[in-house]
Amino acid sequence: MVKSTARFVCQTCGAATAKWAGRCESCGEWNTITEEAIEARPGPAGKAASGKKVSFVGLAGTAEPPPRSATGIAELDRVLGGGLVPASAVLVGGDPGIGKSTLLLQAAAALARAGKRVLYVSGEESIEQIRLRARRLGVIDARLDLAAAINVRDIAASLEQESAATMVVIDSIQTMWLDSIESAPGTVTQVRACSFELIRLAKSRGFALVLVGHVTKDGAIAGPRVLEHMVDAVLHFEGDRGHQFRILRGVKNRFGATDEIGVFEMTELGLAEVPNPSALFLAERRGNISGSAVFAGLEGTRPVLLEVQALLAPNPGGSPRRSVVGWDGGRLSMLLAVLEARCGLRLNATDVYLNVAGGLRVSEPAADLAVAAAIASAAADRPTSPGMVYFGEIGLSGEVRQVAQAEARLKEAAKLGFDAACLPRRVARGNRPLAAPDGLRLDEIGHLSDLVARFGEAPPGDRV
C-alpha cells in the first residue's frame, strides 16, 4: 500500500521542513514555503527491496570516446570546450529576454543544417511562435523538429523511440511537469524530478541535452541548487539590454575550461558572433581623456582588452560616494585605501565613479593596476599613454604582484597595435624570461607609488 505524506519545501533554496513557516530559516526568504505531497513506496510484502550487483570496469577502458558535435557557432563551441559531448547535460541560464532561446534556436538550426537530428521542445511558446522567430532569424529552412509540450512522461516516451538524436533542447525546465508529483510546474520538487528524468534519458540514449533555466531576481538559476550539480555544464548568458553585447560565460564544465566566455552582438537577425571582442570593446575609446586605462584581462583562456574609466568629483561635505559598474566594489574600497595610505593620494573628500566599458564584468585581481592607473590619471587630470596596457595585482602594502599568463596578455595587446605594457616587476626566483612580442616595450614597476609618481600627483615616499 502506498502511503502519502506531506512536507513543506522552500521554493527558493529547496530546504524542507516538517511544518509551515512564514520565513525560510535556510535562505531567509519570506512566503516561499509551500506544501508538497510525497509518496513512500515500500518493497514487496512491506519489506525493503533488495538491490542488484553493480558491475565495475577498469579506468582505461577499451573504446574510444565519441567525438564532439560542433554546433556551428564558434563562440558557443568555445565555451562548451569544443562542442557538444554525447550523453551530456547542459544548463543555460540568464535574465528574461537576454537571448537564451534565440541562441539555442540558432545553434539547433546550424546542427540540423549539418545533417544532425535535433529536437526542440518548448513549454513556453507554441509551434507558430517558434516558426515566427525562425523566420526572423533566417533559419526557417533548417530541418529542425519542433514540439510544444510540458508533460515529461510524454516527452520521455517520445525520446525513447529516438535512436539518432544528437541534440535535444528543453525550453524551459521550469515549465516541465511530472504527473506523479502533486505540485505545480516550477516548484523545487518538480524541477528536481523532471531534470533527473530527462538527464537519465540523455545518459542512456546518448544525446546531448540542453536545458534552459530561469533566474531569480538575484541572478541565480531558479530551482534547487542540486540541479547545477546534476548537469555537466552550466552556462550563464549575461548582458545589459541597453548594450548590444551579450556574454556567454561557462561557470561549470566537466568537459572543458571554466570561466570561458563567448561574446555575441544582438542584431536584427539574431545573435552575431564577435570573434575579436577586444577591438569591439575598444572601438569608441579616446586616448586623450584622463581617467582612462586599458586593462589586458583574461577570461578563461581568451585574452581580452577592456577600457577602465574613472571619474573623480569633489564632495566637500558628507560621506564620499563610491559607484562601481563591472568591478567589485569591495576591491575598489581596498584599492582606494592603499592609494591614500601608501601613495599619499587624498581621496577622502572625493566621489569616485568606476566603469568597465562594454558591459563586461571583470572579476580577476589582475585588474588592480589598470584601475589604479585610471584613478591616478583622473586625480592628476593627465591622460595615460594611449598605446599602453596595464595588468597586475596590488597588495595591501602597495606592492605590485605577478599574475598568470602574462605572455598571452602581451600578445593580444601587440595584435591590436599597442606599443607598451605596464606590468609587475619580475623577481629573481628562477622565473624564465618573459617573451614579449617584437615592438612592445615593457614598463615594469614594483610598487604602486611608482605608478602614481609618473602622473605627478605624489612623490614615491617611503616603501612599506
Image: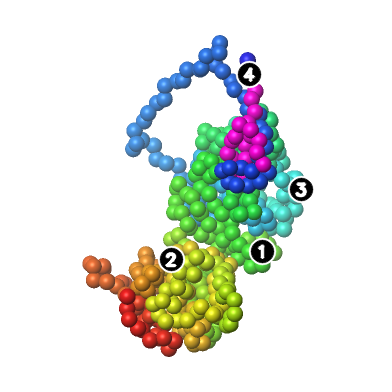
Neighbor class of circle 2 (other Cα within 10 Å; few <14, some 14-19, many 20+) is: some
Residue 270 in the figure: left or right of residue 201 = right
N-term-proximal mark, 1 vs 2 = 1
Q: Helix, strand, or loop for circle 2?
A: helix
179 shown above or below 82: above
Q: Quadrant of residue 218?
A: bottom right
Looking at the picture, how far across and down is residue 282, in whole percent? 54, 75
Please name whichever residue, 24 or 227, is drawn nearer the observer in this view of the structure. 24
Q: Nearer the viewer, mark 2 or mark 3?
A: 2
Looking at the picture, how far across and down is residue 379, in whole percent? 50, 84
Q: Nearer the viewer, mark 1 or mark 3?
A: 1
Say which residue appears at 56% left-offset and 18% top-offset: 42
Q: Nearer the viewer, mark 1 or mark 2?
A: 2
Report which residue position mark 1 lands on.
241
* Gap in angstroms between the C-alphas marked 1 and 4: 50 Å
Q: Which mark is residue 128?
A: 3
Report which residue position mark 2 lands on.
365
Amino acid type, residue under disc 1 in the picture: Arg
Which quarter of the rendered picture does the C terminus lie within? Answer: bottom left
Q: Which mark is residue 2?
A: 4
Residue 428 in the figure: left or right of residue 10 = left
Amino acid type, residue under disc 2 in the picture: Pro
Q: Which residues are magenta?
A: 3-22
N-term-proximal mark, 1 vs 4 = 4
